[in-house]
Amino acid sequence: MVIKQFAVIGSARLTDEKVVAISREVGRIVARMDANLVCGGLGGVMLESCRGFKNIDSAGRTVGVLPSYDASSANEYIDVVIPTGLDVGRNQIVVASASAVIVIGGGAGTLSEIALASQINKPILLIKNTGGWADKLADDYLDSRMNSRIHHVDDIRQLPSLLMDIVTMHHVSPGAINSGHNNETNSSR
Amino acid sequence: MVIKQFAVIGSARLTDEKVVAISREVGRIVARMDANLVCGGLGGVMLESCRGFKNIDSAGRTVGVLPSYDASSANEYIDVVIPTGLDVGRNQIVVASASAVIVIGGGAGTLSEIALASQINKPILLIKNTGGWADKLADDYLDSRMNSRIHHVDDIRQLPSLLMDIVTMHHVSPGAINSGHNNETNSSR
Amino acid sequence: MVIKQFAVIGSARLTDEKVVAISREVGRIVARMDANLVCGGLGGVMLESCRGFKNIDSAGRTVGVLPSYDASSANEYIDVVIPTGLDVGRNQIVVASASAVIVIGGGAGTLSEIALASQINKPILLIKNTGGWADKLADDYLDSRMNSRIHHVDDIRQLPSLLMDIVTMHHVSPGAINSGHNNETNSSR
Amino acid sequence: MVIKQFAVIGSARLTDEKVVAISREVGRIVARMDANLVCGGLGGVMLESCRGFKNIDSAGRTVGVLPSYDASSANEYIDVVIPTGLDVGRNQIVVASASAVIVIGGGAGTLSEIALASQINKPILLIKNTGGWADKLADDYLDSRMNSRIHHVDDIRQLPSLLMDIVTMHHVSPGAINSGHNNETNSSR
């Protein structure tokens, strides 16, 4: 199975035009790879990255995983809508659906997605100089288990080759879940 | 927002060639409407309906919402994969993602999806003579709250106009959740 | 580990005094076993069974697993409240928390819990002559996989020994999840 | 409704005897308040805080919310077990069940719980000098929405009055969910 999917996560409200431009360019990069772009389906980084994606003729699609059951709350650039009814529980699904998680700025919700991504072993790519937790996290791992590598991306022109590496070099085996936290329980399933 | 999405649910294992043929035709019907087909992403009715879908040149996509985190467990006809890690919790997401839920045969898992669809007010279309719960359920509602209408479809040639009616006549308002079960709690949110 | 826990599920609104009396007696039966009673935390069967439970001096506790985040929506007889924010997703947690699931009447929500219980291999005990799905289901299994046994209880005086059998004779191995539906994915975890 | 419940979260493996002692004392503090102690049900901080709790004669109970369906994976000091089958999705339930979240050390899983707690407006109490994210987080809020206050607790002797304040002064209204992230969707429910 060779479905390419990347998650784009970040602030739900954007005021800085530079970050708007970066979000759109990240969307275009994912579109050019003919990959699906999975996000939380609402505003800010989610909307702008999908808007950029739709500028490009792509075999991929934009996917919005919503906290509510209300499909109409998805932004206008979403092709596939996944209303979950799980409230913040949708954060888990956004990151579980991706080969890599691209972070632009971001507050508490974004931080929860980064931490959940680490728990389920997904590579995390922080786009630097976009504010929020993308800038605040400085280390290469979230804890001493060194579960999931954090990449610090200073220039988004590095992004295409980084994403390609992750997909082709199998930096992440699909479905590899091995949070040390859950070791006991995984083994017993 | 005008995203068209239908869920196709049913048995994960198929032996009856007639039901295989019906599953594929249901997939083609959804594809011809340029709608997305959402399913549980695994075998049987899920696989055969997606296989039928991919026979048609469509603007829609096939979406597989998986119980595990393992994207590679999706069947080969899936375009967008949503690995959830929620086990049977993914059933809720399959039906929440659809304007209507099409049922072909089906065991306990399918029954849980039918009942959850009813709780969150989604129209249910039982394809008759396909066995399982699609045949066993005879009434028009699951309980006296008459939350969500059950349609009994004797001939799948009726399906396109039924689905079109549901989408265009707004038989279901998007995001209308009103399970009587949860009344107290919805009002307090 | 020897925690005894039983789920009590059923209609959220009760008008029949006989069913109210049965719900309370079921609560007392669970309390006398010094077991925890897990339910959806709201009204009807949930409230009356907890009310009966609290009539008895028991080492067990009543547990209410709520659809919303709102702890104050729990009924007044709940000792431990689990507000989930998962809406109908809480149904999975109610049945997953029990060695056996006791069903009194019930509509669509109850039916979804019965079907989910079957998927994750929990014994189901239908209290007969209480209306709803407790009466409508007539077979011993929900489908041909014969995953989880359905017991038909004509007289609740049979309940204590049936529950004791389930706990002591290990009719269900704790954590035995083997829905045929999810076979592929379980093996890959 | 006046159920008192506090979550205790932190590292699943402990080597530092000082942190073991703090975990046990936190358990005793919760027990003395006759409150329920909710945790992830496994090892480390979860086990040691429950062990401390059980040293005290309390009207409260220890509650373990597990990632798997396997009740037997709960530690031996758990009174009420909630096996969810939701994997890391259980993190949401742990923090949603508490009036306040007490953090001792902690890695990626703990960080996800802190961030989810902030999204759903739960006060967070970091026990300082216990390592991990309890020490790494220095600010009073996770982002500029200032959703949920972070308290820095230098001495656990401060904990009883802090917890009492949170419960009695209604520092948090029960069920107050107002993540700015989800604003659009909450209003539409």
Image (spheres, coloured by chain):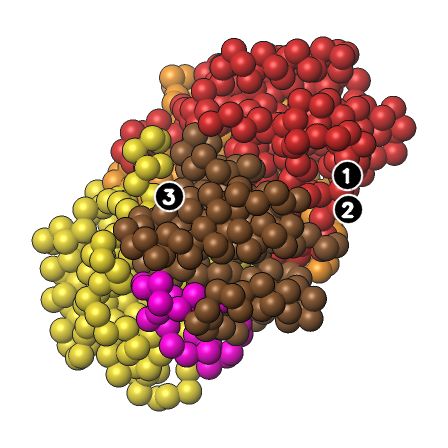
Chain colours: A red, B brown, C yellow, D orange
Under circle 3, the secondary element is: loop
Residue A76 numbered tag: 2
For marks 2 and 1, give the CA distance.
8 Å
Q: Are marks 3 and 2 on the same chain?
A: no
Under circle 1, the secondary element is: helix
Q: Which quadrant would residue D38 be assigned to in this image? A: top left
Position above or below: D153 against B52: above
Q: Amino acid at mark 2?
A: Glu
Please tell me which residue is depicted at 28% across the width and 47% down the height of the picture.
Answer: C180
Q: Work out whether mark 2 precedes mark 1 in sequence or the reverse, and give the earlier one.
A: 1
Q: As drawn, is A112 to the left or to the right of B64?
A: right
Judge whether residue B134 is colored magenta: yes
For marks 3 and 2, give the CA distance.
32 Å
Name the chain under label 1.
A
Q: Which residue is mark 1?
A: A47
Residue B43 numbered tag: 3
Q: Amino acid at mark 3?
A: Gly
The mark closer to the camera, 3 or 1, is: 3
Position above or below: A117 against C113: above
Label 1 neighbourhood size at 10 Å, few (<14), some (14-19), many (20+)?
Answer: many
Please tell me which residue is depicted at 38% across the width and 77% down the height of the picture.
Answer: B138
